[in-house]
Image (tube, rainbow, N blue to C red):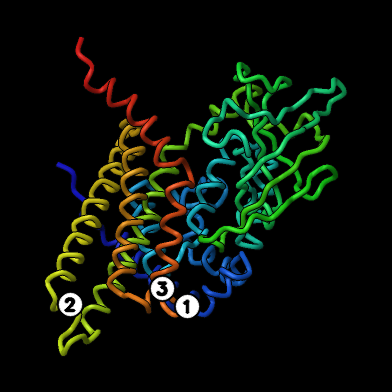
Amino acid sequence: MIDFSITDEQELMLENLREFVARECPEEKIKKWYNQRYIDEDVRKAYLDAGFGYMFVPEEYGGVSSDAVTLALVVTELIKSAKATMPFMSYGLAMFDMSEFASPELMAVAMKYYEETGEQAYSLALSEPCAGSDNQGMTTTAHWNGDGTVTLNGTKTMVSLAETAPFMLVIAKDEDPARENKNMSMWIIDPKQEGVTLAPLHKIGQQITNFSEVYLDNVVIPETALLGERGKGFLQLMKNFELERIMLASHSLGLAKAALEEAAAYAGQRMAFGKTLGSFQLIQQKLTDMEIAVQTMESLLLKTAWEFDQGMSVRLDSALAKRYISMQSTWVCSEALQIMGGIGYTTESCVGRLWIDARGSQFGGGTDEIMVHIAGRQIIKKYARN
């Protein structure tokens, strides 16, 4: 029997998180951050100082050991309380990824920057304009020069935090861009060095997390910039995809919870035809179906996170959670917008922002369709007859 009871320690953490958001992330600041495409440094550092940013960072680097269920609870509460997409959620997980591949010296440098600024220490340059989820279609290459250096050439897109992170983690094919070449390596570079050009991309939602296209033109780096094992870069990156999907699903759930809360409160106060909006059965039906969706989303998320913590395979359930929760979140936010009518379609309300941000989650971290591709193969295996 799975027990989803929140422990006293988790409840205290969530209460502290709610207090942090109320104190440090008022609506006027969130609107400013969406416009400037990053969060002010003092708030980033305050989040880290409060301890949340150290979740999943290895203890040997000053981090706090955690589990997937707690991660899901914290990310969901962060997004619900802020009523916005907050990039904090990925910082500790990114540092966890780096700790698995970087040398102790490089990890120490990254942690020093992280603690000084509260900013994620690196951006991830994986997707490409003509590849996207088709990673084998990647054409960025790393050429070994034979003199202790490597030259990178190619174009990356949808690179989160490229404008603000001090390092960039680039995935490139070894030597040959051919589709048949499955040898990809992981490199850490300085985005300000010669040959690297950034072109900001302006999203319609989730603007706090800046996005860029990155052009690599004969970028020369030392062989020591290799992270992990040569030719195994993409396999290394895949190792933590399931945990990332749990985090992304938690983000979508937080958006849906915030939208439901806003719509229900509005329906209980807004007067129409001499009665509250919420007294009309059609509105009650919308809220009922939204509540069913949110509860179902949360159950699937926590089940998947619990399985992850038990060491069980979540290749299927993490894909199911990512697809279902992302799609349902968009629907819940859309219904909230419909309930609130014209006021919901203005920037005076946060519901429009929640709706746009939720829609973007159906692309980020793997599209709805790619989750079908991943889950479908696992379902065939699950029900195969001997």
Front residue of 26/339: it is 339
Q: Which residue is mark 2?
A: 278
Of the 4 image quadrants, the one containing the C terminus is top left
Q: Residue furthest right?
A: 147
Q: Amino acid at mark 1?
A: Glu
Which residue is more in the foreground, 267 or 77? Answer: 267
Q: Secondary structure at mark 2?
A: helix
Sort mark 3 into few (<14), some (14-19) or many (20+) by Cα contacts within 10 Å. Answer: some
The x and y percentages for residue 82 are: 42, 70
Pointer 2: residues within 10 angstroms few (<14), some, or many (20+)?
many
The first of marks 1 and 3 along the sequence is 1
Query: Circle 1 is placed at which residue position?
Result: 27
Amino acid tagged 2: Gly
Sequence-first tag of 3 and 2: 2
Name the residue: 60% across, 34% down. 101
Query: How far across and down, in percent of the image, does residue 295 sit?
Result: 21, 56
| Residue at the disc numbered 3 | 345
Label 1 environment density (alpha carbons within 10 Å; few <14, some 14–19, many ≥20):
some
